[in-house]
Structures are given as structure tokens and as C-alpha cells.
Image (cartoon, helix red, strand yellow):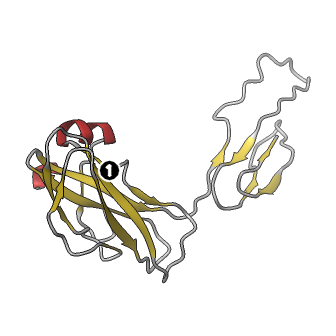
Amino acid sequence: SLARCSAAGASPTGSLKPLMSTRSERAQRYGVDCGEGLEWPAGWVPGREYAKPLVLTNKSDSAMRLRYRLPDSKYFSMAFPEEIFLLPGLTHTLVVTFRPVHLESYDDAVQFSNERGTFYIPIRAHVPSAAAVVPETLDFGFCPVDETAVRTFPISNRGQLPITFEWSYDGPFRLSPASGAMPPGSSVT
């Protein structure tokens, strides 16, 4: 439904992203728990196939019928949609298959509807990223003229890719090390 769409971004197919509700909002409003969605973290390879289960649980006090639409993207696929009948407390598992062709992020959703309304479950695949963490500021406090003040600060690589760094600065400052390389998960001071 267009009223549930946002122009905040587009998926690789160019369609608008639907607004997503949280897991607890979906369970309370629609009576269905299906986790936070499906994510394929960095590490997948284009040209291969990856499958994950999407487990739907009826959290309401009554039986429900669920219908779903296939993801818009050709990179995510599921079995042909059939109506799902769920008694209270029971679960049904759908398999979502991811078939990437390029090393890029993928973002889509599966639309579900029942007698209470329509909701979306996000399905995403992430690519490795570099994530350097450096303090925004460094306070030297008061420092007299012609005196030296030394401060240390950490640099961390919280991404999945190695990073290199090289400082560019003007006098009277000096940074050491002036350059370096950091594998994923490492820190230097």
C-alpha cells in the first residue's frame, strides 16, 4: 500500500522502501512474531545461493490466516505465496533464498497481511565495510608557549575490512605514528 511507503531510500530494484514496524509492535498490533527480519552479514559471495528460515508465530488468542507477497527484488526469492493458517501459539516456517550477483548491499521486504492489517519484514544483505573510530576532538588544555604537551588517543577499526591511515597536519603539531595499517578489529594508540 502506498500509504506505508517512504521515499527515504530505494532498494536495488528502485522501488520505495516500506515503513517497518518493530518486532514488539508487530506482535502487539498484528498478533504475529517473526523476529526482527532476516540479515545476511558481510561474508557472502556473489554467484552463490544462501537460504534462511523466516519463522512466523501466532501470538494472538485466535486462529489467523496470513498472506504474503514475494519480495520485489529478484535477488531474494521464496516459495509461491499460499495462504497460511496458524492456530494460537503455533509456528510456520518460510524459507527466503538470497542469490546475489554483485558485491553490493541489498535491501527488500516481505509483505504480510492478516485480518488486522498489513506489515513488512525486512530482508537485507550487507557488504564488508571499513569503520575507523577516531575521537572528534583532542583537548590539550592550557599549554604555555614553547612548551610541549603530549596526548595519546585510540584509533579503532570496527569494520570488516583492513584500513590504512596517514595524518595530514600543520605545525606546530606532530603525530606519531604518521601513518599505518589496521586489520579489522584492531586498535592503536
Residue 171 position, x and y percent, is 81, 39
Foreground pick, 131 / 146? 131
Q: Quadrant of the N terminus?
A: bottom left
> Between residues 71 and 147, which one lies in front from this camera angle?
71
Residue drawn at point x = 35 percent, y = 75 percent: 75
Residue found 32% across the figure and 42% down from its top: 23
Q: Say whether residue 5 is visible.
A: no
Residue 139 seen by the camera: yes
How far across and how far down the image is residue 101, in percent?
44, 80
Name of the residue lying farthest toward the bottom: 47
Quarter-wise, where is residue 163 in the image? Answer: bottom right
**Residue most toward the right?**
147
- The correct choice, above or below, for 64 with respect to 83 in the image is above
Q: Quadrant of residue 128?
A: bottom right
Q: Is residue 17 left or right of residue 184?
A: left
Residue positioned 76% across, 18% down in the render: 141
- In percent of the image, x 76 and y 54: which residue is there? 166
Q: Single out the residue that lies furthest toward the left.
A: 115
x, y percent for residue 144: 86, 17
For mark 1, what is the residue? 34
Crowd band around label 1 with a 10 angstrom C-alpha radius: few (<14), some (14–19), many (20+): many
Find numbered disc 1 in the image and state the secondary structure of the residue it sits on.
loop
Count the marks: how many?
1
Q: Is residue 36 left or right of residue 29?
A: right
Label 1 sits on what residue type? Cys
Where the C terminus falls, by quadrant? top right
Tell which of 27 and 128 is nearer to you.
27
